[in-house]
Amino acid sequence: MLERLAAPDGVMAVRVTGQVSEADVAAAIGWMDEALNSHDKVHVFAETEGLTGADPSAIVHGLANGAHLLTRLRRFGRVAVVSEQRWVRAMSRLESAVLPGISYQVFDTTGRNAAFAWVCGPDAAEA
């Protein structure tokens, strides 16, 4: 399940729990498109809690409908990933390594507040 969190303008903040569905992926892509259409830079805060995986249809939908976001990578600013699950933090570090130019930081749950403050930063609302 995907839940959008309150965040300053220019920051897309989400909480992901349990199993990710196709509808969750579609919503996330839509939110990101909205943010990128309104801001020169978009920062991302993502926290997971009890993430169990993604439906196969969610993966297919993400690949088919989210690929256009790769052409806009230079528009992503800070990305913070918060998770109690080591495998999520490890995958986030791997993603960081293959997406140069995006500033990633990965946190465990004790660093949630620091992660949110870092992503929001003083320039989060720049358009």
Image (cartoon, rainbow, N blue to C red):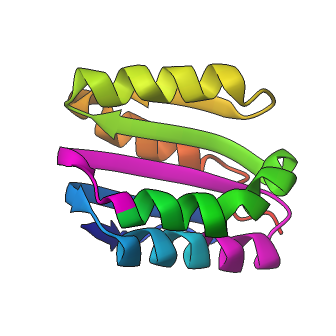
Q: Nearer the viewer, residue 38 or 26?
A: 26
Instruction: Indicate whether 104 appears above or below 56.
Output: above
Instruction: Identify the image quadrant of residue 85.
Output: top left
**Residue drawn where x is 60% and y is 57% of the image:** 63
Query: For the magenta stretch, what is the residue range?
Result: 32-56
Residue 126 placement (x, y as % from top left): 79, 63
* Residue 102 visible in the shown view: yes
Q: Nearer the viewer, residue 48 or 109?
A: 48
Instruction: Give the left or right position of residue 72, taking residue 55 as reference.
Output: right
Instruction: Indicate whether 12 appears above or below 75.
Output: below
Residue 44 placement (x, y as % from top left): 56, 52
Instruction: Identify the image quadrant of residue 99.
Output: top right
Q: How many marks?
A: 0
Residue 110 placement (x, y as % from top left): 22, 29
* Residue 118 visible in the shown view: no
Q: Quadrant of the C terminus?
A: bottom right
**Residue drawn where x is 49% and y is 76% of the image:** 26
Whether the magenta-drawn stretch holds residue 122 is answered as no
Instruction: Give the left or right position of residue 71, taking residue 57 as reference.
Output: right
**Residue drawn where x is 27% and y is 35% of the image:** 83
Instruction: Give the left or right position of residue 20, taking residue 43 as reference.
Output: left
Whether the magenta-drawn stretch holds residue 51 is answered as yes
Q: Quadrant of the N terminus?
A: bottom left
Instruction: Give the left or right position of residue 58, taking residue 112 as reference.
Output: right
**Residue drawn where x is 46% and y is 61% of the image:** 13
Q: Nearer the viewer, residue 100 or 70?
A: 70
Instruction: Indicate whether 103 appears above or below 19.
Output: above
